[in-house]
């Protein structure tokens, strides 16, 4: 079955070409750093320290690199007239519509869906590491 690009429905104010708010990107970076620090702090000791740090670093590069490349590609290809004012607050951004491939969402809902996976992994790594540190006798 061939797939074809479907146009995003337009109409009304929204973020058709204005991208994500910088706070969403900053939150992605902060959660990724928290993930890496949790992994290094709780699981960095032991026989395979080098391998663990290499895998964690690879995940770190991938998790930050993809959103960074998307942001830079968007900034490079959008006309200056279509960029979002830099002084726009997150509240103002979140209250508008955000265009996705399959339709429109509120900005707040789009930010939640974007941040949920990295937040779940970061919080999960911290909790697993804390339980490991407190429960395993040689770790604590």
Image: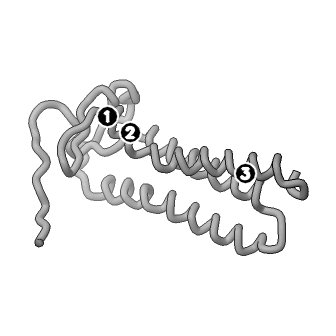
Marks 1 and 2, Cα distance to the nearest angstrom? 6 Å
Q: Quadrant of the N terminus?
A: bottom left
- Which residue is the site of mark 2? 111
Please say if the residues under marks 1 and 2 sit with CB atoms less than 8 Å apart. yes
Say few, some or many: other residues with alpha carbon within 10 Å of mark 1 (under 14 / 14 to 19 / 20 or more): many
* Residue visible at 31% across and 55% down in the picture: 74
At mark 3, the secondary structure is helix
Q: Nearer the viewer, residue 133 or 106?
A: 133
At mark 2, the secondary structure is helix
Colouring: one colour
Marks 1 and 3, Cα distance to the nearest angstrom? 33 Å
* Residue visible at 17% across and 31% down in the picture: 13
Sequence-first disc among 2 and 3: 2
- Which residue is the site of mark 1? 107
Task: Estimate the x, y position of residue 58 in percent, counting from the top left.
Answer: 58, 68
Task: Estimate the x, y position of residue 138 in percent, counting from the top left.
Answer: 90, 58
Q: Nearer the viewer, mark 1 or mark 3?
A: 3
Q: Nearer the viewer, residue 87 or 120?
A: 120
Say few, some or many: other residues with alpha carbon within 10 Å of mark 3 (under 14 / 14 to 19 / 20 or more): some
- Which residue is the site of mark 3? 129
Q: Nearer the viewer, residue 32 or 122?
A: 122
Marks 2 and 3, Cα distance to the nearest angstrom? 27 Å
At mark 1, the secondary structure is helix
* Residue visible at 83% across and 63% down in the picture: 45
């Amino acid at each position: 079955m061939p797939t074809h690009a479907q146009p995003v429905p337009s109409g009304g104010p929204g973020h058709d070409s204005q991208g994500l708010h910088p706070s969403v990107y900053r939150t992605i970076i902060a959660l990724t750093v928290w993930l890496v620090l949790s992994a290094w702090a709780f699981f960095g000791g032991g026989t395979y320290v080098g391998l663990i740090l290499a895998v964690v670093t690879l995940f770190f590069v991938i998790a930050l690199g993809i959103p960074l490349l998307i942001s830079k590609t968007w900034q490079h290809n959008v006309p200056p007239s279509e960029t979002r004012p830099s002084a726009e607050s997150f509240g103002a951004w979140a209250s508008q519509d955000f265009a996705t491939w399959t339709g429109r969402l509120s900005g707040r809902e789009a930010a939640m869906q974007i941040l949920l996976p990295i937040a779940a992994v970061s919080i999960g790594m911290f909790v697993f590491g804390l339980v490991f540190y407190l429960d395993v006798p040689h770790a604590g």
